[in-house]
Image (cartoon, rainbow, N blue to C red):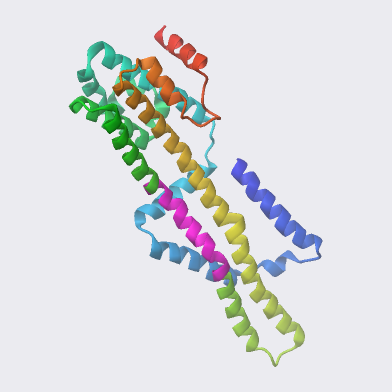
Amino acid sequence: MQKLIGVGLVALCVFGGFVMANGKLIALWQPSEMVIILGAALGSMVIGNSTTVLKEVLHQLKGLLASRKGEAQLARELLMIMHTLLDEIRQKGLKVLDAHIEAPMASPLFQRFPEILKEPILVNFITDNLRMLAMGKISAHEFEAVLEQEILAIEDDLLRASKALHRAGEAMPGFGILAAVGGIIITMQHLDGPLGEIGVHVAAALVGTFIGIFGCYCLFEPAGAAMAELVHRKISTLECVKAVLTSHVAGKSPLLAVDAGRRVLEMDVKPSFATVERWLDSEAM
């Protein structure tokens, strides 16, 4: 909702200011200019990116419009599931993990945490690294280094979508100039016509520059920045898992390990230590 409000505010101020200056909105309606600019932008993205990245762009754009109300619940479930898994290991050993990490979607333990199951990257990260723990001994330092490299690789993959949109946004003013130059060429063909007709053609050409600048700074660039922020929030959940598992390997109790993960969550969803203890007490009842 916030993103839609932002788009509405931008449109209201830009086009409202144009109207306040006695401009006519119909003058900005130049379908041919939009076809050139938007077609060039989309075409450049298709040329410069893989199908996987293009699909991720669409996926993340949809994510921008999704509500963030579930993020606090996701943070809670993440801390709860990590404590439950570590407590199971403490009581029954690493072999108990086999029933959960091989088929997490069918695991009764994972099914208790529906918000976790909605995040396949997070689920895979948890299960893959628990599997690595079950396969043999590894020092906390080595384990942390492995997890850090994996997180960096995942972050790099997820950020490709925002970078692709950013590159297209940077090129939008250039595409606007491209459309404007085309409009000037058309204008030159009508120099022998009435002065009013020449003015109409020049105005239509300048609309191309207007659309290019508007698309860059009011749409593409802000959307790319918002997508990057969305990725960083997802990565914070992986950082949380890394902190929990690294603390566990270092010999910390499940509660202290979970507290280490709590500390790296985003500020607006990070619970206090007392809140986590209260959640654990209610879960144990």
Tell me: residue 165, above or below residue 1. below
The residue that appears at 36% across and 34% down in the rendered structure is: 122
**Which residue is situated farthest in the left direction here?**
136
Report x, y in % for residue 166. 50, 57
Report x, y in % for residue 149. 32, 41
**Which residue is situated farthest in the bottom direction here?**
192
Which quadrant of the figure contains the N terminus?
Answer: top right
Report x, y in % for residue 206. 66, 73
Residue 41 relative to residue 156: left or right: right
Tell me: residue 188, above or below residue 6. below
Magenta segment: does it hold 169?
Answer: yes
Highlighted range, magenta? 157-175
Report x, y in % for residue 274. 51, 14
Tell me: residue 78, above or below residue 172. above
- Relative to the observer, which residue lies in front, 145 or 187? 145
The residue that appears at 41% across and 52% down in the rendered structure is: 160
The image quadrant of residue 80 is top left
Tell me: residue 96, above or below residue 3. above
Tally of numbered discs: 0
The image quadrant of residue 139 is top left
The residue that appears at 31% across and 22% down in the rendered structure is: 250
**Residue 267 visible in the picture:** yes
Residue 208 relative to residue 94: left or right: right
State whether the magenta stretch is mostly helix, strand or loop. helix
- Relative to the observer, which residue lies in front, 217 or 11? 217
The residue that appears at 46% across and 29% down in the rendered structure is: 264
- Relative to the observer, which residue lies in front, 142 or 42? 142
**Residue 112 visible in the picture:** no
Magenta segment: does it hold 80?
Answer: no
Residue 167 relative to residue 7: left or right: left
Which quadrant of the figure contains the C terminus?
Answer: top left
